[in-house]
Amino acid sequence: MYKPRYVSAQSQWSMIVMDAGTGQILYSLNPDTMIFTASVRKLYSVATALGVIGADHRFKTPVYRNGTVDTTGKLTGDLIIQASGDLTFGGRQKPDGTVDFTDYDHNDARGFQGAILTPEDPLTAMNALAAQVRASGITSVNGDVIVDDRLFDSFRVPNGNVLISPMLVNENVIDMTLSPGAGVGQAAVLDWRPRTSAMMFQGTAVTTAAGIDPDIVVSGDAFDKAPLSCVSTPGCRATVSGGAGLDTPATIPLAYRSALIGNDIYVSNVRIDDPPSFARTALVDALARAGVTVSAPAVQPNASAALPSSQSYTSANQVASFTSPPYSEFAKLILKVSLNTGANLSLMYQGVAQGARTVGDALGTERKYLTGTLGLDGSSFDFPTNGSGTPDCRATARTTATLLATMHRGANATVYRNALSILGTDGSLAAVGKTVVGKENILVKSGATIDASGQMVAINMAGYISAKSGRQLAYALFVNHAGPASTPAAALDVFNDEADILGIVYSQY
């Protein structure tokens, strides 16, 4: 804690270690200082969702017909898909029903300057729904396909200005991959997923000699901007280019290796800023593949104003449904890879279950659960805008460890523990603490906030330790204002310092 990095930056440390079973304090340092949590805040949103909706809760996304079907299979009327907030919507689902993830998640491709994609098809759910529609006897739709996204009011979070919507396909990102060609000067291989009529990539990319730095910019609606809002308009394009502008080719060297990740493919993404329209097109495309024609164009704005009352949805007019894995699998994905979208959806899951439709109301129901049901001190945490943590969420180390100890004694203890990363092994901290003795006994939720000026505002850890003595510990270890992130590895250096501290705790207690 007194390395030159922290002394010169006047870093603020806060730490507490307690017996997870009894709550006895074993060590503390500034435990009651309100401190920026970064993504450690996700421990609170996932804990609340587990308590309110339950670990076994599954999200059902039905499709209804709003009209009549004649003897030829023609539906005169609309098909309506009712969004359920299903985080993965089949896109990560493995054959055994569990949810897939990698240590470098595609949602963080821009921050990591790369990612490792899971192999599952992001259109799994859409294809399954379309097949069921066809199996119900519908062969054509003389009307529209509409996404009902009224489950809750969509909102934006300050961390990345990401739109949180009840309708998700591939977590509302388009993954772009670029691989070098066979030789210098040859075209690089551009691909993306999911492939729909809603958008495509344009631009050129050229292979350069090995050892030359890549020059790649992936743009949404404007140069070097990630969001893509044109998906309801025919001809929507995202662009791959070089850094000099949209008209310059991207370059990628032979024998390319991602600097942080080490894989041989460049991965980036653009975010979908109109999820209902994108999902509508994805379903229209899937229906065509299943042999169901739709009279409405595949690409057009989602006609939410034409939705009927939700009271009109009945089992008699339901023609398809897709069911998610249990929320326990979502919790694992959210905490292990620190998935912002999933944490904010978790905030809304518990809110919707308690009658909240806006993020403000959901924050209120969450606070009531944390202070009432779990008994946390309301003055010791402040979550004003979102469920994922950055940039404005604060809490004390004591309350964070108390949350962990309370969950350790509760009905969801095993699910909650299993959702955390194992230090130096998996999730977002797979590369951290590799040499720490006892790392396999240290469970971690990490959090990092680096501001626009490159300062490390918060580099934090919290979780459980099965100590060498056999004692079960809950801990929180926070450092705010850790200095400049002068290199991409700077935050990892701080995390490794914290991992060394946790290794001491493992041995001493």
Image: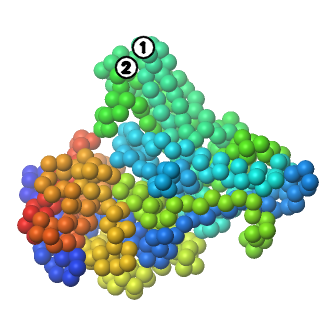
Residue nearest the observer in this picture, 191 or 452: 191
Left or right: residue 154 compared with residue 315: left
The residue indicated by pointer 1 is: 183
Structural crowding at the residue carrying mark 1, measured as other residues with C-alpha within 10 Å and reported as few (<14), some (14–19) or many (≥20): some
Secondary structure under the numbered disc 2 in the rendered image? loop
Residue, x 75% and y 60% (percent of image)?
319
Please state the total of marks drawn on the protein image: 2
Structural distance between the alpha carbons of marks 2 and 1: 7 Å
The residue indicated by pointer 2 is: 254
Residue 463 x, y percent position in the rendering: 26, 66
Tell me if residue 83 can be seen. no
Secondary structure under the numbered disc 1 in the rendered image? loop
Residue 109 x, y percent position in the rendering: 41, 43
N-terminal-most mark, 2 or 1: 1
The disc placed on residue 174 is: none
Labels 2 & 1 near each other (Cβ < 8 A): yes
Residue nearest the observer in this picture, 242 or 78: 78
Residue, x 65% and y 54% (percent of image)?
276
Q: Is residue 119 above or below residue 87?
A: above
Residue nearest the observer in this picture, 6 or 144: 144
Residue nearest the observer in this picture, 20 or 215: 20
Q: Amino acid at mark 2?
A: Leu
